Image (spheres, rainbow, N blue to C red):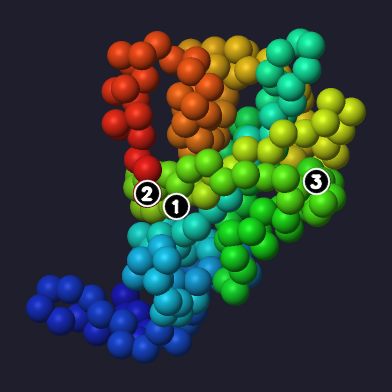
Amino acid sequence: MRLPGVTAVAGSLTLADPAALQPLARALVGAGHGRWRGEPFDVRAQPDGPVLGQVDRGVLPVLGIQALGVHVNGLVRGPEGLRLWVAVRAAHKLLDPNKLDHLVAGGVAAGMTVWDTLLKEAEEEASIPPELAARAVPVARIGYAMERHEGLRRDLLHCFDIELPENFVPRPGDDEVARFELWPIERVFAEVQNGDAFKFNVNLVLIDLFLRLGLIEAERAQALRAALPSA
């Protein structure tokens, strides 16, 4: 298969012109690799480095290019103890349908900042107004690489906590979430420990939350913290 803009040099592939990334993505999708999502993402050599080009989100794992994402723990404190808002992903989602997810989560599209993405996704996915979403506090950056059926996922997740009033009830603002449920933190902990109902990368963010809350015994916590792929 001949790929536009790609040159083979000494056993490796190079792309001299970043503008060729999108035509390359089109060619890959046309050949059955990945799917076109119509959502360009910025490409960087380093997460905080300059933008080198853009490529459609659906081809990022095919090329093994790192993507930036935002995940928000929606916390509620009250007489019943600490609870967490859990999203149930829509059944029609191509990736991980019906899996459990964060209150707010999404990829950082081209030209957007992490904070822009948080405010946008909060309003679109959970109908959280900007003045409430602005209470979110950054707590971690988690990077990982793993093989999935869509390719090599290399993601850097910007993780936030937001404490929400007891009287606030999130509502799906688009078709990505079927519903929201408010779970005691102990139930969330038990599901992550014993089940696989949560979307694969949500577990990493929740483990970080459990560690910060002191829910994991000291010796095990130390091992998990050392193993958690922070960035």
Marks 3 and 1 sit apart, C-alpha to C-alpha, by: 25 Å
Q: Position of residue 138 (x, y in %)?
A: 57, 46
User: What residue is at 45 percent from the left and 62 percent from the top?
Assistant: 60
User: What residue is at 48 percent from the left and 18 percent from the top?
Assistant: 214
Residue mark closest to the camera, 1 vs 2: 2
Tag 3 and tag 2, C-beta contact below 8 Å: no
Instruction: Give the quadrant of residue 165.
Output: top right
Return the residue found at the far right: 167
Q: Position of residue 17 (x, y in %)?
A: 37, 89
Q: Earlier in the sequence, mark 3 or mark 2?
A: 3
Whether 186 is drawn above or below 127: the answer is above
Residue tagged by mark 3?
132
Q: Give left or right: position of 216 versus 227.
A: right
Residue type, label 2: Ala
SS class of the residue under badge 3?
A: helix
Q: Give left or right: position of 119 versus 16.
A: right
Quadrant of the drawing holding the N terminus:
bottom left
Residue tagged by mark 1?
156
